[in-house]
C-alpha cells in the first residue's frame, strides 16, 4: 500500500532522523483537510460574534452591531421561555376550560380530570406532601422527641374517612380556607381512672362497632363516662362525629392521630390545639397571600378526591359519615 | 484466502517470498476509476432481474388501500400501516423478529452460496449498475471512458459530463423522494414538494438521500464495498469450505499463458487460462478472481459470463471460473447442501422468528390492556375496616373507531367490589386511554399479603373484543 503513495519523489524531510533511517516527509496535508481547518477557524470568529461570549459586555454578553443573523438574539433563558411557551400552548385549552369550571364539573369530565390529576400530582408534592405524605398516605411520627407527637401529622387522604367531609366541594373549601382542629383537654375535667375507662370504650367502639361495645360489660364504665361527660357534645350521641365542626367519627377503623391505647389517652388528656402537650392539627389556608391560584386549588381538590376516598356529592348525610376518629 | 496463486517454487520456502507477495498484491484505493465492461451472459441476465426488485422501492409507496396509503411507516403518528393492519409501538417487538429473519436469510444464503446479496440484490450494487449503465450510454465503452477521463476539458467532454451528472442527480433525487414517501403520505409529499413547502426534516432527509445516492453510487462505487460496508467483513465468518462461490479453477487454468498463433489447440504445457483479463475487465470492483476469493469480490458472477464466452470461442469447456466450493477445487469430497449443519441452524432460527411474527400478527388483538397497581400506598384501610387497592388502567384501542368497554375482575378476594367501573369507559381510537379502578375487599376474606386478580375489559357492543391483564391485590401482613 505504502509503495504506491508518498514515494520520496524529491520531497524534503524535516531533517530529524529517528532510529537510523526514519524521517518525516514535509508533505502538505490533504487540500480538503486544510480547507476544513481554515473554514473552522473562520467559523469560530463568526460564532464568537453571534453568540454570548464576552462576559464583560454591557447590556448583555453579545458583541452587537454586525447585523449577523442571530447576533444579540440568543440567550439560554430565552430558549427556555420559548420551550415553556410551547408547553403552555399545549396546556392552554385545558387551563382555559378549568378557569370557569367548578371542581365537581371537572371531576365529572373524564379527560379533564385525568389531565388535572397529572398536574395535581406536582402541586400536591410541592404543597401538601410535607404533612399528608407523598400520595396522601399520611406521615406517621414516631414520637422520638416528644410523646405527644407520636401519631399522624395530618390525616391520611386515601381513605374514605373525613373530619370535615369528603365531598369534592368540601375538600375544595378545606384547601381554600384551611382548617383548625379542636378538642378540649380533659386532664382537669376527668380523673385518671375516668380517662382510662373512656379510652377503653372508644377503642372498643372502633374495634367491635358501637353496638357491640355498648353491650360489652368490660367497657361499661367508659361508656358511662362517654355519655355523661362532654364527649357527646362534639362527637354526637352515636359517636360518629359531626363534619360541620370537624369532630371525629369514633366508630370506624380510622384514627386521626394514633389508635393505640396510649395514643387515645394522650389525645383525651391533652386535647387538640389546646395548649401544653396538646395534639397539633392545623391545615393552612392556601388562598391567603396567593399561595395557590384558584385553578391550582381546584386541581388539588380533584386530585385529592381521586385518591379513592372522596365521597360522592349525592350521598345522604347520614351515610357520608365523615370524621377521622379521634 | 488472499494468497496469490502464482508462487515461484524457489521462493515459497524463503522468508523473502513475503516481499514477493507484497509486490503482487495491489490495493484498490480508488485512485483509478474502474470502468467495468458490460458483457451479456447468464449471470448478467439474472442480475438485471434481481436488481429490478428495487423498482418496487420507487412505486410501492403510491399503492392505496381503503383510501389510505397501503404501506406507510408512519413515524410521525408512531404507527406502521400495512394494508389493513396497523402496527403500534406496543407491537414493535415483531420488527425485531423481522430484522432477525432478514439477518438469518442473509446468513443462510451466504453459508450456501456466499455473498448473493452483495452481488445481486444490494442497493449499492444495483444503483452503481444503473449509474454505470447511464455512463456507458453517454460516454461509451470503458476504453472510451478512460480516454475521456484523461482528455482535456473540451466542450464535448464538458457536455457529456454535464449530461451524465444531471441524469445521475435526477436519479438520486428520485431515490431521495422515493425513500421519503414511505414515511408519509406520498401524494401529499409530492404536493408539498412542488410548492416548496417541505419541512426542514423532510428537506434534510431528501437532501441526505439525494447527495448520499449521488456520492455513493456515482463516485465511491466499489470503494463502498471495500472500505465502508460492514457486511463485506461479516461474510468471512459465514462462508466455509462448503460454500460455493465464483472461483477460478487453478488446476485447470495454470500455468496460464497468452494464446500463441499457430499453437496446437491443446498445448499440454499450458493451462486453459489464456490470460486475457476479460474477467478483470468486467469486474465491477476491479478484482482479479484468479487471485482467489477475496474481500473485493461481491460474487456477482459477471466474470463467469466473461470467461465462459472466451472458452466458447476457444472451443474449450465452460467453467474455468465457476461457482465451486473450496472442497471441490481442492479435490476433497463435496458434501451435499443438506450436509451443512450451519445452514440448518440459521434456518431454524429463521423459522422460529417467522413463527413469532405469524403468532404476533394473528394475535394483534384490538385492545391492549395494562394495569398498574398503585405502589404508594399499596393498600388503604377504609373506615369500615375493608382494604382498598387502586389500579391505573391503560387501554390501547388499536381499531379505527371509538369503543365503550366495561371492566370486570376475576379471582381476587371473596366479596370484592370494583369501584369506578359503574359506567362503560370510552376508548378513543388509536390511543391509550387511562382511568382508575378501585377494588375494595373485606379484610376478613383476605388470606395473604398478595392475591392474584385478573382484570377484563370488553367492548360493550362486541364482547369478543376483549383483553385481560393479571395483577395483584395487596393487603397488610397477615
Image (cartoon, coloured by chain):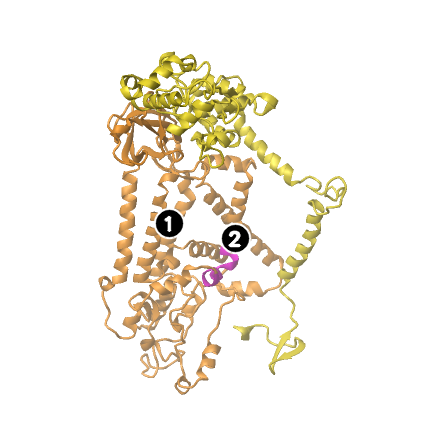
Sooner in the amino-acid sequence: mark 1 or mark 2: 1
Q: Give the letter of the orange chain.
A: B
Residue A304 relative to residue B273: left or right: right
Q: Nearer the viewer, residue A173 or B78?
A: A173
Residue B288 painted magenta: no
What secondary structure is the stretch in magenta mostly built from?
helix
Q: Which residues are magenta?
A: B216-227
Find residue B433 and report its image quarter: top left
Residue B224 painted magenta: yes
What is the x, y in percent for residue A154?
Answer: 47, 27
Height in image: A125 above or below A63?
A: above
Q: Chain of mark 1?
A: B
What is the x, y in percent for residue A238?
Answer: 35, 13
Residues packed near mark 1 inside 10 Å, few (<14), some (14 to 19) or many (20 plus): few
Cβ atoms under marks 1 and 2 closer than 8 Å: no
Q: Chain A's shade in the image?
A: yellow
Q: Chain of mark 2?
A: B
Write the residue at 36% across / 80% down: B255
Circle 2 residue: B214
Residue A77 relative to residue A200: left or right: right
- Circle number at residue B53: 1
* Figure quadrant of the C terminus of chain B: top left
What is the x, y in percent for residue A298?
Answer: 50, 21
Height in image: B144 above or below A315?
A: below
Label 1 and label 2: CA atoms lie apart by: 20 Å
What is the x, y in percent for residue B197?
Answer: 56, 36
The residue lying furthest to the bottom in this view is B10
User: Is residue A112 visible to the viewer in this orientation of the structure?
Assistant: no
Q: Secondary structure at mark 2?
A: helix
Height in image: B358 above or below B426?
A: below
Amino acid at each position: 500500500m505504502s509503495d504506491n503513495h508518498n514515494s520520496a519523489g524529491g520531497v524534503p524531510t524535516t531533517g530529524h532522523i529517528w532510529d537510523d533511517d526514519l524521517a518525516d516527509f514535509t508533505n502538505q496535508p490533504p487540500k480538503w483537510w486544510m480547507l476544513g481547518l481554515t473554514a473552522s477557524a473562520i467559523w469560530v470568529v463568526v460564532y464568537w460574534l453571534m453568540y454570548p461570549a464576552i462576559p464583560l459586555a454591557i447590556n448583555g454578553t453579545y458583541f452587537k452591531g454586525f447585523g449577523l443573523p442571530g447576533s444579540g438574539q440568543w440567550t439560554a433563558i430565552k430558549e427556555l421561555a420559548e420551550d415553556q411557551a410551547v408547553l403552555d400552548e399545549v396546556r392552554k385549552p385545558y387551563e382555559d376550560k378549568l378557569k370557569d369550571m367548578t371542581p365537581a364539573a371537572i371531576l365529572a369530565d373524564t379527560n379533564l380530570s385525568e389531565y388535572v390529576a397529572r398536574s395535581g400530582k406536582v402541586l400536591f408534592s410541592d404543597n401538601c406532601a410535607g404533612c399528608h405524605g407523598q400520595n396522601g398516605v399520611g406521615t406517621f411520627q414516631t414520637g422520638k422527641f416528644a410523646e405527644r407527637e407520636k401519631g399522624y401529622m395530618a390525616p391520611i387522604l386515601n381513605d374514605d374517612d373525613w373530619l370535615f367531609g369528603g365531598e369534592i366541594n368540601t375538600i375544595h373549601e378545606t384547601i381554600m380556607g384551611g382548617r383548625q382542629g379542636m378538642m378540649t383537654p380533659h386532664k382537669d375535667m376527668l380523673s385518671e381512672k375516668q380517662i382510662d375507662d373512656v379510652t377503653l370504650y372508644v377503642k372498643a367502639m372502633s374495634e367491635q362497632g358501637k353496638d357491640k361495645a355498648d353491650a360489652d360489660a368490660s367497657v361499661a364504665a367508659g361508656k358511662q363516662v362517654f355519655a355523661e361527660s362532654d364527649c357527646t357534645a362534639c362527637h354526637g350521641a352515636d359517636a360518629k362525629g359531626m363534619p360541620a365542626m370537624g369532630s371525629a367519627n369514633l366508630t370506624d377503623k380510622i384514627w386521626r392521630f394514633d389508635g393505640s391505647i396510649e395514643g387515645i389517652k394522650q389525645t383525651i388528656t391533652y386535647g387538640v390545639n389546646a395548649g401544653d402537650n396538646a395534639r397539633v392539627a392545623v391545615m393552612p389556608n392556601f388562598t391567603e397571600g396567593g399561595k395557590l391560584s384558584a385553578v391550582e386549588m381546584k386541581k388539588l381538590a380533584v386530585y385529592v378526591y381521586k385518591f379513592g376516598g372522596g365521597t360522592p356529592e349525592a350521598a345522604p348525610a347520614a351515610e357520608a359519615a365523615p370524621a377521622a376518629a379521634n | 484466502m488472499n494468497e496469490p496463486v502464482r508462487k515461484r517454487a524457489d521462493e515459497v520456502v524463503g522468508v523473502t517470498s513475503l516481499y514477493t507477495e507484497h509486490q503482487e498484491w495491489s490495493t484498490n484505493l480508488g485512485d483509478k476509476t474502474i470502468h467495468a465492461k458490460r458483457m451479456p451472459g447468464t449471470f448478467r441476465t439474472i442480475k438485471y432481474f434481481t436488481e429490478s426488485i428495487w423498482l418496487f422501492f420507487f412505486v410501492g409507496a403510491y399503492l392505496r388501500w381503503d383510501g389510505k396509503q397501503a404501506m406507510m411507516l408512519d413515524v410521525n403518528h408512531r404507527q406502521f400501516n400495512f394494508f389493513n393492519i396497523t402496527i403500534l409501538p406496543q407491537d414493535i417487538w415483531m420488527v425485531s423478529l423481522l430484522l432477525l429473519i432478514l439477518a438469518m436469510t442473509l446468513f443462510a444464503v451466504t453459508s450456501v452460496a456466499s455473498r448473493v446479496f452483495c452481488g445481486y440484490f444490494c442497493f449499492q450494487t444495483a444503483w452503481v449498475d444503473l449509474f454505470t449503465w447511464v455512463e456507458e450510454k453517454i460516454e461509451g465503452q470503458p476504453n472510451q471512458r478512460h480516454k475521456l477521463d484523461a482528455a482535456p476539458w473540451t466542450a464535448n467532454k464538458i457536455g457529456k459530463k454535464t449530461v451524465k451528472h444531471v441524469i445521475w442527480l435526477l436519479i438520486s433525487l428520485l431515490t431521495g423522494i422515493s425513500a421519503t414517501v414511505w414515511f408519509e403520505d406520498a401524494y401529499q409529499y409530492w404536493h408539498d414538494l412542488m410548492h416548496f413547502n417541505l419541512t426542514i426534516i423532510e428537506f434534510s432527509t431528501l437532501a441526505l438521500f439525494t447527495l448520499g445516492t449521488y456520492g455513493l453510487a456515482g463516485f465511491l462505487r466499489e470503494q463502498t464495498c471495500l472500505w465502508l460496508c460492514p457486511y463485506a467483513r461479516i461474510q468471512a465468518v459465514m462462508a466455509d469450505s462448503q460454500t460455493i462461490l465464483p472461483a477460478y479453477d487453478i488446476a485447470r487454468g495454470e500455468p496460464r499463458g497468452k494464446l500463441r498463433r499457430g499453437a496446437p489447440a491443446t498445448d499440454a504445457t499450458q493451462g486453459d487460462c489464456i490470460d486475457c483479463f476479460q474477467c478483470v475487465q468486467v469486474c465491477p470492483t476491479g478484482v482479479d478472481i484468479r487471485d482467489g476469493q477475496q474481500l473485493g469480490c461481491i460474487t456477482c458472477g459477471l466474470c463467469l459470463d466473461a470467461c465462459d464466452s472466451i472458452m466458447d470461442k476457444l472451443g474449450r469447456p465452460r467453467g474455468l471460473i465457476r461457482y465451486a466450493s473450496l472442497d471441490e477445487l481442492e479435490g476433497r469430497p463435496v458434501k451435499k447442501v443438506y450436509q451443512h449443519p450451519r445452514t440448518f441452524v440459521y434456518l431454524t432460527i429463521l423459522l422460529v422468528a417467522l413463527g413469532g411474527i405469524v403468532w404476533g400478527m394473528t394475535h394483534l388483538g384490538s385492545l391492549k390492556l395494562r394495569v398498574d397497581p398503585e405502589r404508594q400506598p399499596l393498600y388503604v384501610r377504609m373506615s369500615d375496616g375493608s382494604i382498598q387497592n387502586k389500579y391505573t388502567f391503560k387501554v390501547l384501542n388499536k381499531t379505527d373507531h371509538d369503543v365503550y368497554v366495561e371492566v370486570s375482575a376475576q379471582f381476587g378476594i371473596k366479596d370484592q367490589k370494583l369501584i369506578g367501573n359503574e359506567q362503560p369507559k370510552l376508548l378513543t381510537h388509536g390511543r391509550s386511554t387511562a382511568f382508575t379502578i378501585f377494588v375494595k375487599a373485606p379484610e376478613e376474606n383476605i388470606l395473604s399479603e398478595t392475591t392474584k386478580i385478573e382484570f377484563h375489559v370488553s367492548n360493550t357492543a362486541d364482547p369478543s373484543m376483549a383483553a385481560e391483564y393479571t395483577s395483584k391485590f395487596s393487603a397488610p401482613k397477615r
